[in-house]
Image: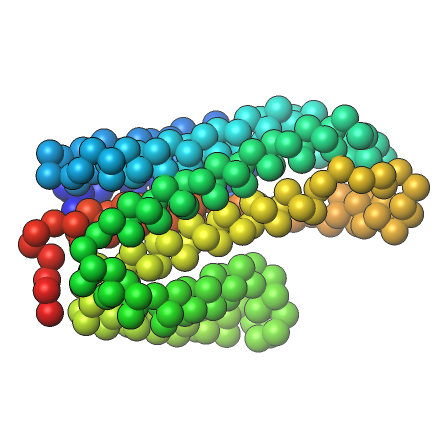
Amino acid sequence: MPSAKQLVLLLGAALLAVVGALFGSPWATGAGGVVVLGVLAVHPAVTGPAVPRSTRLLLQGGLLLLTLAGVVEMWGWAASSFGDAPPSASELIALVTDPVRQRTQFLRQLAVASCLILAGVCLGVAIGRLPRDRLRRIGLAAPAVGVLTLITLVFVALLPSGLTALLGSFTNVAVTALLVLGGYAWVVSRAVRRHGAAPIAAIGATLLAVAAWRAVDDAWRIRPEPRGSDAFYQTGVSVSVAVETGLDVETAVAVAVLLLGAALTVLAWARLSTTHSETR
């Protein structure tokens, strides 16, 4: 497990990345994400002499691919044609219907999705090299905590707008959020007491799978296709420009999911791979 200094560094860098994404700063987001993944890559649990060289390369390769995905995403974000000024509806329609830009955006998003998928494969293979009894614990814990994690992520995604409309007031949303997140923490803590670090590894793998699926879905939605004469599409773009979205909560949640998934997967693997892991 990370030392107090490493934990402070990880939490501070992760907070910088999430806040940067929330306020639309690619540089803060990228810097925070690189620090988090870099600290994980040089963590003694990964680089220690007891870790087989092939497993260490898998873990560090997975973290490198996650870093590459983040750099590609942030580079495209920083290279926005409009800078800090929001585009008008006519400017945005002209931009998103430009064939050259469509192809560039698609290839960029495809590269991000490919890096995330390959990173998940590397980390999954590293987990698969664990002793059989610990793999069995992950298999026992994964269905319950995985499904519960997905449900909680959907709930978090609905927090900014959907739940307020459904529950009627901010107070009701806050109480519901406390109940849902508190219940999730209680279930996970019970699973950890029963199976050790195995549920944490399952949660981390679930979060990384969600991040990869989101990247693949984004790449599919922006695949190049002629849209210049699509009046319905142009109307949708105009509406999206007219509606003020404020803070970018969706991107902040996506960044948090990716970094948390990487940290939980790597640190849980480190815990499970030690000879001091419980053998109930």
Res 249 seen here = no
Q: Nearer the viewer, residue 38 or 87?
A: 38
Place of residue 195 in the rendered image (x, y in percent of width and height, measured from the top left): 20, 67
Q: Nearer the viewer, residue 222 or 15?
A: 222
Seen in the picture, residue 103 relative to 22 is either above or below; the reply is above
- Residue drawn at x 72%, y 31% is 103
Residue 6: quadrant of the picture: top left
- Using residue 243 as the reference point, say whether residue 192 is left or right of it: left
- Using residue 58 as the reference point, say whether residue 106 is left or right of it: right
- Residue drawn at x 16%, y 39% is 51
Res 96 seen here = yes
- Residue drawn at x 55%, y 26% is 75
Place of residue 172 in the rendered image (x, y in percent of width and height, measured from the top left): 50, 74
Q: Nearer the viewer, residue 3 or 165?
A: 3
- Using residue 113 as the reference point, say whether residue 232 is left or right of it: right
Place of residue 178 in the rendered image (x, y in percent of width and height, measured from the top left): 39, 70
